[in-house]
Amino acid sequence: MGPVRLALLLLLLAAAAVVLGPGGGGEAVYIPYNTSAGVVNGKLNVHVVPHTHDDVGWLKTVDQYYVGSNNSIQNACVQNVLDSLVPALLKDENRKFIYVEQAFFQRWWRQQSDMIKDTVKGLVSSGRLEFINGGMCMHDEATVHYIDMIDQTTLGHRFIKEEFGQIPRIGWQIDPFGHSAVQAYLLGAEVGFDALYFFRIDYQDRDTRNGTKELEVVWRGSKTFGSSADIFAGIFPKNYEPPPGEFYFEVDDTSPVVQDDPLLFDYNVEQRVNDFVAAALAQANVTRTNHIMFTMGTDFKYQYAESWFRQMDKLIHYVNKDGRVNALYSTPSIYTDAKFSTNEPWPLKTNDFFPYADNPNAYWTGYFTSRPALKRYVRMMSGYYLAARQLEFFIGRSKSGSTTDSLGDALALAQHHDAVTGTEKQHVANDYAKRLSIGYKKAEELVSTSLGCLSESGSNSRCSSPTTKFGQCPLLNITYCPPSEMNLSQGKSLVVLVYNSLGWKREDVLRIPVMSDSIVVHDSEGREIESQLLPIANASSHLRDRHVKAYLGTSPAASPKFWVAFPASVAPLGFSTYFISIGKRSASISSTSTLNSQGSESRNLQVGQGRLKLQYDAAGALSQYSDSKTQVEANFEQKYKYYLGQDGSGDDPQASGAYIFRPKGVVPIKTDGQVPPTILRGPILDEVHQQINPWIYQITRVYKGKDYVETEFIVGPIPVDDENGKELSTEIITSMATNKTFYTDSSGRDFIKRVRDYRSEWKIEVNQPVAGNYYPINLGIYVEDGSKELSILVDRSVGGSSIKDGQIELMLHRRLLNDDGRGVAEALDEKVCLDDQCEGLVIEGKYYLKIDPQGDGARWRRTFGQELYSPLLLAFAEKDGGNWGNSHVSSFSAMDPTYSLPENVALLTLEELEDGSVLLRLAHLYEAGEHKDLSAPASVDLKRVFPDKKIGKIIETSLSANQERAAMEKKRLKWKVAGPPPKENVVRGGPLDPSKLVVELAPMEIRTFVINFDHRLAAHPMSNS
């Protein structure tokens, strides 16, 4: 062998020694990975938190996501996640996992054997599997109502408590598009959470907080509760995914795995440890204390859980051998406790995190309005669900018949941050609506049965099959009500039963479509009552004819010609009965509206029969509002305009879409030369009908006995023949000097001060002067100028703003032709199809306007706002001669007939649970200092709320009814806040005395009770009429 050959051989042997490991022997052995690390004082602790984020619908429907179907859209199967999770956790007692969405978990749980269930219960009780957030979904925070947030969270929390005995203690809102104050204090502190973690805040806000290490704060979301409802809030520095450095370990991910077998090529332990440590040190640079969290997971990950845990085991083992940082399997609960134990004072955050932008031209403020029909459907079903549960309680929850459960489940799913938001694919939006419809039909049967039982004399509380069949009209908004279209000849009458789900007496005007112009309305005493006939507008008839066929597949059998309007008065938690028949109308009581066209009166015009008057100018435009009782007078205009949606073709490819509002111009809609307005006058209300343009019809109503203006709009199809997407807004313009300031509600609860082009905690660079000043509105918006307040209340979630002083605008409808690049991969171009002909969606809706003296507007916003959320429930039956009162009770109240709830208190929940106990929630409607009289504490006498039932046991619980309130308050963490202590006077209602049974409610308090009644009497002593 020559010297050259020998040298080559030695080189090869040396290379083999490197490849095969130390000593050249190269032996692969079993490595027992040490994953047992806990927190280590004095080191940077990296809390490795394995998680999956599972949308209950987005690109696929909730069931498609669960079973893993329709994978051509997205490869995702939640069943795989949960199936593979159990054996992966069992492999190592130190492994941990958190799970959020109970809608998915409950689907999985139903299918498991007792053996698997016992195993999972062991994992939960040992803390290796922890339920975080715990609601049925991760609800949105902008387009949801606080009552829906509470209901869906309660459903999930009670399931977790009943099945596992566990109480979630951490909020995990990692994906909603901005965050509300109500989430922080109400769905955080008041459900007993110690911390709330999330990701999406404005990019400018995040940059500021990164620089000042203020991504983790104490969030004081309530002005009224102050520090008593503080919660620790953690904002993720980049996203809710693994840290930078490639740490994605799904089977098909491309991140480098930890290759620690010396017999194999590509050994990379040192490199992977360095990547991990580098990511940890970078995150530590923007985080206070020696604890950081790595969110190890993202959307629909862990479909083969072992592929993640295998790599995390190795990382924890080798990182800790390296010793520069300490890595540990953790959960947000462990992380929160570690943060708390440092005794650090934290920066204070107040108000909320709206609006959210992720780059200069991408404000996520379009979704405040997207899919307005779905948003309205959700709100209607929410109020109906509240009333239906009350009626279910009155007659007793059925073990076998119809219940409200299906509607409750459908509503819970609809609160998801890709459901009511309108940010899902069209087929998924259809699925949410279908579930609501199925749930409604089951609840409708229950409501019909309950009202039948309650209205029939002698019916007892467990009645299940009354003889009276009540029908309902869910499509009344498009003038479709089959029960009221019956032939009323030969002595027949239409029975209208009106149920009031509020805790106070209510008076309202009902409007019901009828066939004849010879209509008489009687009350339960047989007295003819005042009524007014109004011809049904052609726009309403067209809406009805097209949509009834599109929704139901059949054309309506009849075409009603008139609305009959009449006043109704209903006791709290009770009903009244009215009768509509054909007969000779008393001229002094009932009347047909007089009709005239503005074209024949080229002069100013005034409408309004009572204290409130509206003035129209000669061109038919609104010009003045006056209230003779409050002496308020104001000049104002109401106009329409549309924003042209950016199509993404410019230098910045960001388009306007389902999420993003990015206007490229605004076009005022002129009414000049259009059809002159039509005015209908009568003793109950006046109406002004205006065809604004070919696709906008408006009816403005002023009721004699009311002090607000009701505006109904029929909008669409929005034309897109010019290939421009459009976003339609209405605006109210006054001369009020409002100093850039306006107020919008937080999830229908607190009102938050907004200042145009300003953020109180960071300096904003204004790139989008319109979209960047839009905020979510669920209840209302108002402005004030020191002498008066202009308030507008809405019938669904919308986006709105005050873009100029003295002005308020609401975005009513959006139709866009481009996707905005946030994953949904569909343009927001909703259509309704009939006989294979599709055209853009038409929206019917209402908003309500009032101008008050400064300081007085809160009363209307709160009281009427609650009436909007809980409209009177109408049920219809046929009476064929005979005396209804001989066989029926015509009026009813579940409460003591001399009692009603205080004006500042609402009954949020009255529900019989599966175990026979009863869930009761009472809410004070006012913030501290909001109203001179009604912001005072209130009290509710439960003995008078339940006069015929004896309360055997009553326990006050957390908001989500999964723990006793006293225990919750005792164990909640009290966080230190940097700076001087607040000057505050926080008031809470005192403990409930079980002998007096009087609930005290301080401003903004919601108190929740679980009640066991000693017995339920057979029937309520209802007044017989």
Image: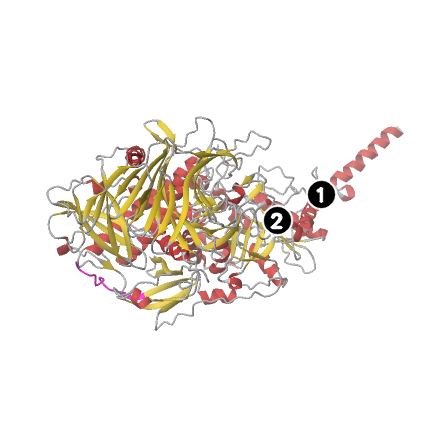
Q: Is residue 1024 within the magenta segment?
A: yes
Predominant secondary structure, magenta span: loop
- The local secondary structure at tag 1 comes to helix
Residue type for callout 1: Gln
Whether residue 863 can be seen here: yes
Residue type for callout 2: Lys
Q: Position of residue 216 (x, y in %)?
A: 60, 55
Q: Quadrant of residue 679?
A: top left
Whether residue 397 can be seen here: no
Relative to 1, 226 lies left or right: left
Q: Nearer the viewer, residue 716 or 882?
A: 716
Q: Position of residue 24 (x, y in %)?
A: 77, 41
Q: Which mark is residue 927?
A: none
Which residue has dot 2 on it?
Answer: 763
Magenta range is: 1013-1025
Q: Quadrant of residue 631?
A: bottom left
Which residue has dot 1 on it?
Answer: 271
Where the C terminus falls, by quadrant? bottom left
**What is the CA distance from the residue labelled 2 to the residue labelled 1?**
40 Å
